[in-house]
Amino acid sequence: MYDIIGDIHGRADELEALLLKLGYQRQGTVYKHPERKAIVVGDFIDGKGQHRKTVDICRSMVEQESALAVMGNHEFNAICYSIPDGTGDYLRHHNEKNIRDHAELIAEFPFGSHIPGL
Ligand SMILES: [Mn+2]
């Protein structure tokens, strides 16, 4: 049995509350369910705060095989925002709107930073 969870949008505290409500238990750094797996279907980011905590929760669940994950459009946009296009800009242009849209994420994941373990 699977629990399908989408549109977390950086709301890590609410994600943890939902996992507990669904019967997942925190074991060390990972949420696990005795019989079920979560499928996290994207939009981990793009919202107010807690992006890193959201990614940490989901990533540890995937690594410990208590969840599967699918990238959403906001993750795709963030990846494109970080990849130079060879003309001095990025695949997702760094225009005023996009800079504003990615500001909260970049505050938690500055360019050049790396995620421990990757
Ligand atoms: Mn969404």
Image (cartoon, rainbow, N blue to C red):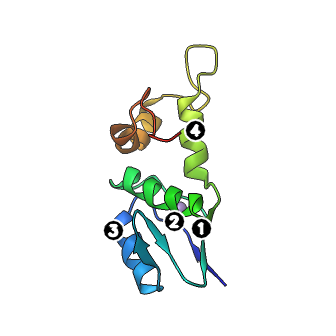
- Name the amino acid type tagged 2: Asp
- Name the amino acid type tagged 1: Ala
State whether label 2 is within 8 Å of ligand 1.
yes
Task: Specify whether residue 94 is in view.
Answer: yes
Q: Do tag 4 and tag 1 residues touch (Cβ < 8 Å)?
A: no
Checking the image for residue 86, the label placed there is none
Whole-number angstrom distance, CA of label 3 to CA of label 1 = 18 Å
In-image side of 89 versus 23 (left or right): right
Q: Earlier in the sequence, mark 2 or mark 4?
A: 2
Discs 3/1, front: 1
- The residue wearing badge 1 is 67
Q: Earlier in the sequence, mark 4 or mark 3?
A: 3
- The residue wearing badge 3 is 13
The quarter of the picture where the N terminus appears is: bottom right
Q: Residue at x 42, y 71 (%)?
A: 27
Whole-number angstrom distance, CA of label 4 to CA of label 3 = 24 Å
Checking the image for residue 7, the label placed there is 2
Whole-number angstrom distance, CA of label 4 to CA of label 1 = 22 Å
Q: Do tag 2 and tag 4 residues touch (Cβ < 8 Å)?
A: no
- Residue 18 x %, y %: 42, 79
- The residue wearing badge 4 is 79
Viewer-proximal residue among 32 and 109: 32
In-image side of 97 versus 70 (left or right): left
Answer few, some or many: residues within 10 Å of disc 3's Cα (few below 14, many 20 plus, some between 14 and 19).
few
State whether label 1 is within 8 Å of ligand 1.
no
Q: Earlier in the sequence, mark 2 or mark 1?
A: 2
